Image (spheres, rainbow, N blue to C red):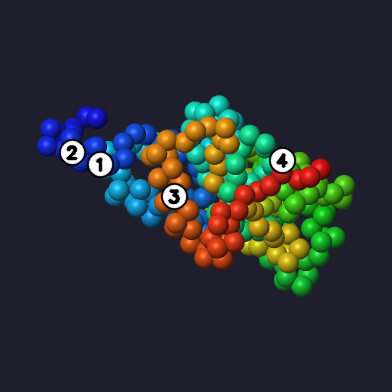
């Protein structure tokens, strides 16, 4: 490895060596139920002679990269069950239903906003969310716009022309600025499972296993950590 001196050769033989390619969904960088920064720190402290490469993509792209073996592991949002993938639950992400400033519903009192009223306005959605339990589309709902990236959904909501779903930690900055608000939380909010994804048939190197162990050990939610131990999202019998 570049930059390693002769005096470090003994250290190398006793340390983890190699590269880890990690995929990540962009909204999970500051997820409250994960501790990715601490996991990376723990990994690097015991693996000084490793290289960590992180790629940020949409969940569907990450699935493809795992299957193609262009990345070793990923932290993503569970969308569907794929036999070739191991998807280990490591956290939750709360998804809320948002209205942007300037929308006709933005200044209404919560008690004045009904599901029937909401159904009269246009919604936007992210490609994968059409498969989510929390955003099943009904005939009465008007969906006219979509985006393959969450930034696009946020922009549509901020325009004041659309209603839509966003992760709460992602939308928090706009809520704090008074540019977005949640509506009908008790009806439209839901949780996504956050999963550690690997390819079931792929042999994992020692350094990749070490990264997986560090991620598992630093899940912030102790209830999730105990329940998973480490639970996987199983295929439906259907």
Q: Find disc 3 in the rendering and name its residue.
A: 213
Q: Is residue 68 above or below residue 169?
A: above
Q: Position of residue 34 (x, y in %)?
A: 49, 56
Q: Earlier in the sequence, mark 4 or mark 2?
A: 2
> How far apart in space, not on screen, are marks 4 and 3 (Cα)?
40 Å
Residue 175 found in image quarter = bottom right
Residue located 53% across and 60% down the image: 225
Q: 111 or 204: nearer the eye?
A: 204
Q: 154 or 91: nearer the eye?
A: 91
Q: Which mark is residue 14?
A: 1
Q: Find disc 2 in the rendering and name its residue.
A: 10
Residue 7 found in image quarter = top left
At mark 2, the secondary structure is helix
Question: Mark 1–mark 2 contact, CB under 8 Å?
Answer: yes
Q: Residues within 10 Å of mark 3 (few under 14, many from 20)?
A: few
Q: Earlier in the sequence, mark 4 or mark 3?
A: 4
Q: Which mark is residue 131?
A: none
> How far apart in space, not on screen, are marks 1 and 3 (Cα)?
18 Å
């Amino acid at each position: 490895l570049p930059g390693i001196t002769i005096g470090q050769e003994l250290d190398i033989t006793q340390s983890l060596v190699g590269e880890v390619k990690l995929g990540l969904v962009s909204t999970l960088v500051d997820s409250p139920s994960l501790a990715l920064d601490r996991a990376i720190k723990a990994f690097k402290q015991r693996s000084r002679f490793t290289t960590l490469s992180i790629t940020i993509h949409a969940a569907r792209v990450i699935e493809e990269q795992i299957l193609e073996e262009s990345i070793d592991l990923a932290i993503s949002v569970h969308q569907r069950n794929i036999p070739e993938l191991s998807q280990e639950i490591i956290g939750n992400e709360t998804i809320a239903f948002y209205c942007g400033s300037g929308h006709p519903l933005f200044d209404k009192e919560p008690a004045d906003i009904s599901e029937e009223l909401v159904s009269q306005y246009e919604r936007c959605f992210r490609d994968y969310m059409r498969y989510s339990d929390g955003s099943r589309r009904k005939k009465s709902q008007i969906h006219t716009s979509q985006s393959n990236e969450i930034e696009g959904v946020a922009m549509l909501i901020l325009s004041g022309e659309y209603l839509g779903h966003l992760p709460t930690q992602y939308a928090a900055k706009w809520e704090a600025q008074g540019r977005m608000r949640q509506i009908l939380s008790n009806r439209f909010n839901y949780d996504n499972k956050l999963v550690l994804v690997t390819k079931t048939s792929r042999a994992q190197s020692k350094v990749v296993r070490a990264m997986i162990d560090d991620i598992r050990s630093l899940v912030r939610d102790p209830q999730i950590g105990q329940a998973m131990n480490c639970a996987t999202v199983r295929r439906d019998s259907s």
